[in-house]
Image (cartoon, grey):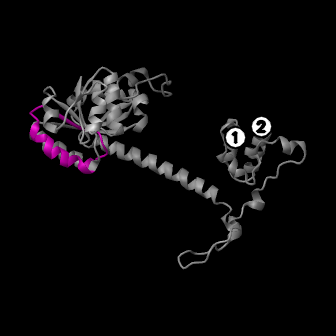
Amino acid sequence: MQLGMVGLGRMGNYMVQRLMRGGHECVVYDARPESVAELAGLGATGSASLQEFVSKLTHPRAIWLMLPAAIVDKVLASLVPLLENGDIVIDGGNSYYHDDIRRGADLITKGIHYVDVGTSGGVFGLERGYCLMIGGEKGIVEHLSPIFATLAPGVGKTEASPNRSVEAAAASTAEQGYLHCGPHGAGHFVKMVHNGIEYGLMAAYAEGINILKHANIGAASHETDAETAPLAHPEHFNTTSTFRMSPKSGAAAASSPPGCSISRPMRCMLTPHYRNMPAAFRTAAKAAGRSWRQSTKACRRRC
């Protein structure tokens, strides 16, 4: 199938490469000529302007925009006058789903179809594939299914979810890594929720690790200034006496690897040894109270 790609950043570039590996024909355009030249050297059809880009696509055209959300409307304003009835515009960036609803309603009056695709995969998508959350008309989404199937990770060798019937799996493309989520805006709505979960989880990890890193801040001295409130109970933030783990004396201490001779067991979670701990020890390491000491002592014995 032929596809035009506007926007050849790392994701747009890798998506074109993945599509060409899958046997699709790609016409490409970017404001940076060097980005176009790179993909042209790999087999894509390059273009120096939007006009040339559109002229090299066969009607009905399928054009994928892989652009920052802030400039999608600006590019559409230049692109749409060049298109014809039946052409398809796909926004694969991170547009606000309200904008998708507006664009879909506006473009259909011009005979142009609009599809919004939340695209997840980043710089690893070239090899691993992209998970695609799609909004738009059902018939148009089905028409584009060869593109989506090539970009998506595919079923792979992962076992099916428990209690999921073969019939249910066969009835949905979700097992392959892409899904038609509903009308205009549905794809980017689902991607918005996806991003909220992902970023919230990363923020929680970061805050937890930061707390561990500064768990002994009550034992440190601090400059006095007008903007920072002093710790009301610095003893509550002094883990040295509570969590100190002194290595055994003699031969046992000498044989302990450097990664395990630590002053606070919580640091064991941040060392390579934690990644090698048995699952039971890792579970214990995540618990509160005595299990910190128990699990890290077990880690030291194992190491």
Q: Is residue 162 left or right of residue 10?
A: right
Provide residue 267's location: percent of width, then percent of height.
Answer: 68, 50
How many residues crowd mark 1 within 10 Å: few (<14), some (14–19), many (20+)?
Answer: some
What's the amino acid at mark 2?
Arg
Evaluate if marks 1 and 2 touch, with contact meaning CB atoms under 8 Å apart.
yes
What's the amino acid at mark 1?
His
- Residue at the disc numbered 1: 273
Q: Quadrant of the N terminus?
A: top left
| Label 2 element class | helix
| Label 1 element class | helix
Q: Quadrant of residue 46?
A: top left
Q: Quadrant of residue 116?
A: top left
Q: Is residue 280 left or right of residue 43?
A: right
* Residue 116 in sight: no
Q: Is residue 285 left or right of residue 154?
A: right
* Residue 117 in sight: yes
Provide residue 34's location: percent of width, then percent of height.
Answer: 29, 37
Specify the farthest residue to the bottom.
226
Nearer to us in this view, 199 or 260: 260
- Residue at the disc numbered 2: 302
How many residues crowd mark 2 within 10 Å: few (<14), some (14–19), many (20+)?
Answer: few
Q: Is residue 164 above or below residue 34?
A: above
Q: How many marks?
A: 2
Nearer to us in this view, 201 or 22: 22
Residue at screen point 58% across, 54% down: 208
Highlighted magenta segment, given as a residue range: 70-98
Residue at screen point 15% across, 28% down: 56
Provide residue 25's location: percent of width, then percent of height.
Answer: 25, 23
